[in-house]
Amino acid sequence: MGNVDPTGLMGAGGSAYKALSLSDDEIVAMSDESCAAMDRKNTIANAAGAYATRLATVVKAMPSTINGKPADYRVYMTKEVNAWAMANGCIRVYSGLMDLMNDDELRGVIGHEIGHVALGHSKSRMQAAYATSAARALASASGIAAVKTLTESQAGDLAEKFVHAQFSQAQERAADDYSFDLLTSRKLERKGLVTGFQKLAGQGEGQQAGALLGSHPPSAERAARMQERLDSAG
């Protein structure tokens, strides 16, 4: 089962086996379809506008590839406080999050989302989303060609389930550590991991749709843990 949450597969019938047997290429193909569906649903910030320009500056020193896939950073114009990344390198940051955080805090969150991809968490999240989404109708099919037959509705449902799913506590902590280590290796400010989580805690966790605000463990606890790492690092 790896990192797949068993509760996400309960009741999925034969699609559970198919979900667990998805190849890396199929996961990437599903991510392509899901990300495209989300892009069609949301308003993407103008490349020459203030939000896209700021994000380009924020990620200039961040990875340009994740697990060999080009990193595609874009901003969704929405008040929701959220961000996510998929196995195909699709990274989306919401303008509501950018309004809330300074540049160092944004890098901390983005590094965290990159960590989920690099550590394989996004793969297991897509597997669980697939097993419980309308796309599970493909359980009897196989291969990338089958994935590309997803209807707009199926791709949209799969994307929504992926974006709003929650990672386990262990996965969240591992992604936090990945971000801390990534920022350290690139000689970037790490304090944003502390203050960023403090801001998320102040937003009232679990009160909004974004999985970022419904984190487990709570953001205040994660902020304290990052402060401990920062103090230990000197």
Image (cartoon, rainbow, N blue to C red):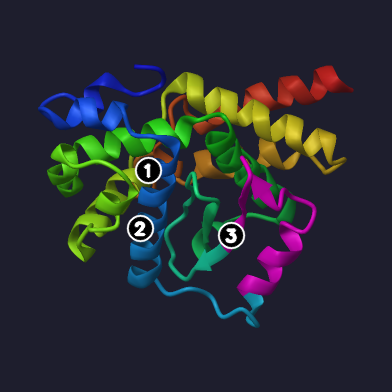
**Residue 72 in view here:** yes
Tell me where residue 177 sits by quadrant.
top right
What stretch of residues is rendered in magenta?
Answer: 51-73
Tell me where residue 53 sits by quadrant.
bottom right
Give the residue drawn at x 70%, y 66%: 56
Give the residue drawn at x 33%, y 34%: 22
The three-letter code of the residue at mark 2 reads Glu
Give the left or right position of residue 187, taking residue 209 as reference.
right
- Asked whether residue 52 is drawn in magenta, I would say yes
- Asked whether residue 164 is drawn in magenta, I would say no
Is label 2 in a helix, a strand or a loop? helix
First of labels 2, 3 by sequence position: 2
The three-letter code of the residue at mark 3 reads Asp
Is label 1 in a helix, a strand or a loop? helix
Q: Which residue is mark 3?
A: 72
Which label is found at residue 33?
Answer: 2
The three-letter code of the residue at mark 1 reads Glu
Q: Nearer the viewer, residue 211 or 24?
A: 24
Which label is found at residue 26?
Answer: 1
Is label 3 in a helix, a strand or a loop? strand
Give the left or right position of residue 189, taking residue 38 as reference.
right
